[in-house]
Amino acid sequence: GRGSGALVTDLSQGTAFRITSECFEKRSELVKILELQGTVGSDAARMAALNRSEKQLACMQKALKLMDEALETGPGGIRQWLDAEYQLYFEIAQASGNSFFVEFLAIINNRIKMKLEIAALNNVRVAEFTPAVLAEHAAIVEKIELQDAESAANEARVHFTNASSRTSARGDLRD
């Protein structure tokens, strides 16, 4: 009816561009990477809850604060958000006490950065730039603070599962 026409108009306000098959391939690769991050991330969070120092916890909380500030900034804050998000998971990996988690995270992050050279996939990342996602990250840190290993692992799994779903759902539209 009338409403569906309006939707098309709204979408055409954005930058219209074609999605190449390569973009969908890259997006499904990104989803696979997020699944892998979920497995490693939840194990790292579990171990971080058991092994973290107060200083490491403070670094995680600082990363959350930077992400919060980035949200306040709005669209211009996306770069700060992504850097702080990486920092958060770097700190969690460090706090796990397993240096291989840290190395693995660096490799994964480089892979993601390579995939995101494609503009359409950068828009996928923007789907993560929300207060709801910050709350997911904060829940992980809270369980690490409480040294509740199983809950920390679960919250991390929830976050990466959600990120994977959001990535699948998004990425075919430019803002």
Image (cartoon, rainbow, N blue to C red):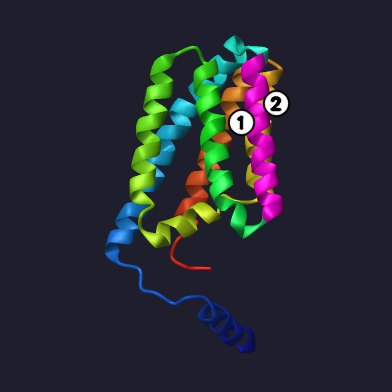
Mark 1 against mark 2, which lies toward the viewer?
Answer: 2
Q: Where does the N terminus fall, quadrant-wise?
A: bottom right
Q: Is residue 151 above or below residue 67?
A: above
Residue depicted at x 45% and y 56% = 122
Q: Is residue 40 above or below residue 137?
A: above
Instruction: From the image, tell me which residue sits under label 2.
Output: 142
Q: Residue furthest bottom?
A: 2
Q: Quadrant of residue 111?
A: top left
Q: What is the distance, in whole Å, between disc 1 and disc 2 at their CAs? A: 10 Å
Q: Amino acid at mark 1?
A: Glu
Identify the mark at residue 155; answer none if there is no mark.
1
Which label's residue is closer to the chain start, 1 or 2?
Answer: 2
Q: Amino acid at mark 2?
A: Glu
Residue depicted at x 55% and y 16% = 95
Q: Nearer the viewer, residue 103 or 20?
A: 103
Residue 8: percent from the left, percent from the top? 53, 82
Q: Are marks 1 and 2 in contact (CB under 8 Å)?
A: yes
Q: Nearer the viewer, residue 27 or 161?
A: 27
Q: Quadrant of residue 88?
A: top right
Q: Which residues are magenta?
A: 55-73
Position of residue 30 in the picture relative to residue 78 (left or right): left
Q: Nearer the viewer, residue 102 or 36?
A: 102
Residue 102: percent from the left, percent from the top? 43, 22
The answer to whether residue 143 is seen in the rendering is: yes
